[in-house]
């Protein structure tokens, strides 16, 4: 894989992914809609130790999340663009990279759609797409993530 790079709007914070994402979530929850100002958030999930900051330093902002566990959003301190998050379930071991901040966001298409119960009604999810009213269960991980992705996710979660 060619290293994916990205950054904020003003260029102060730049980062590089040192591996392919484990999985790409398209989240349709109301929290993601509110925080992004859009109909969903597209997050490439990767081990935090595989995200290299190239320039600047993102600032942590703690916010609520749909799960109730909260999230830490990392934003550029100057332009305030959200670059990635750490969610309560995985904590700081996994970074949920905002795909729109990648230099080439077309490389990260969704592997699954979550919280579709609150999707904007005009958003059409392909019939063959993995999608869940709320979130998928652990038994779905190998199918969605693939063998390598599932193993990487187990390592992130400490098991």
Image: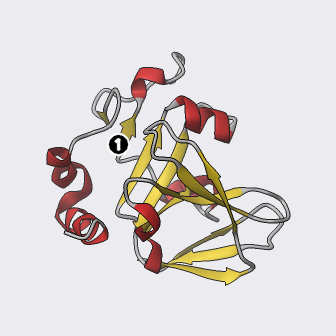
- The quadrant the C terminus occupies is bottom left
Give the tally of numbered discs.
1
Reply above or below: 29 against 64: above
Q: Residue at x 31, y 31 (%)?
A: 132
Q: Place residue 55 in its image quadrant.
A: bottom right
| Left or right, residue 27 beside residue 9 | left
Disc 1, SS: strand
Camera-side residue: 121 or 88? 88
Residue pointed to by mark 1: 112
- The quadrant the N terminus occupies is bottom left
Q: Residue at x 34, y 26 (%)?
A: 133
> Residue 22: where, in percent of width, then height?
34, 63
Camera-side residue: 105 or 132? 132
Mark 1, Cα crowd under 10 Å, few <14 / some 14-19 / many 20+, is many
> Residue 19: where, in percent of width, then height?
41, 76
| Left or right, residue 131 beside residue 47 | left
Q: Residue at x 66, y 83 (%)?
A: 54
| Left or right, residue 42 beside residue 45 | right
> Residue 40: where, in percent of width, then height?
55, 36
Q: Place residue 150 in its image quadrant.
A: bottom left
Q: Residue at x 54, y 55 (%)?
A: 106
């Amino acid at each position: 894989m060619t290293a994916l790079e990205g950054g904020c709007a003003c260029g102060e914070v730049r980062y590089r992914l040192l591996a392919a994402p484990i999985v790409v979530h398209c989240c349709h929850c109301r929290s993601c809609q509110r925080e992004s100002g859009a109909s969903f958030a597209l997050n490439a999930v990767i081990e935090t130790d595989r995200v290299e900051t190239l320039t600047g330093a993102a600032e942590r902002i703690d916010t609520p999340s749909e799960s109730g566990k909260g999230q830490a959003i990392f934003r550029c301190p100057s332009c305030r663009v959200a670059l990635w998050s750490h969610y309560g379930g995985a904590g700081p071991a996994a970074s949920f990279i905002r795909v729109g901040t990648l230099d080439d966001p077309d490389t990260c298409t969704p592997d699954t759609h979550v919280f579709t119960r609150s999707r904007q009604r005009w958003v059409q999810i392909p019939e063959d797409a993995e999608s869940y009213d709320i979130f998928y269960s652990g038994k779905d991980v190998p199918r969605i993530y693939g063998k390598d992705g599932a193993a990487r996710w187990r390592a992130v979660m400490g098991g």
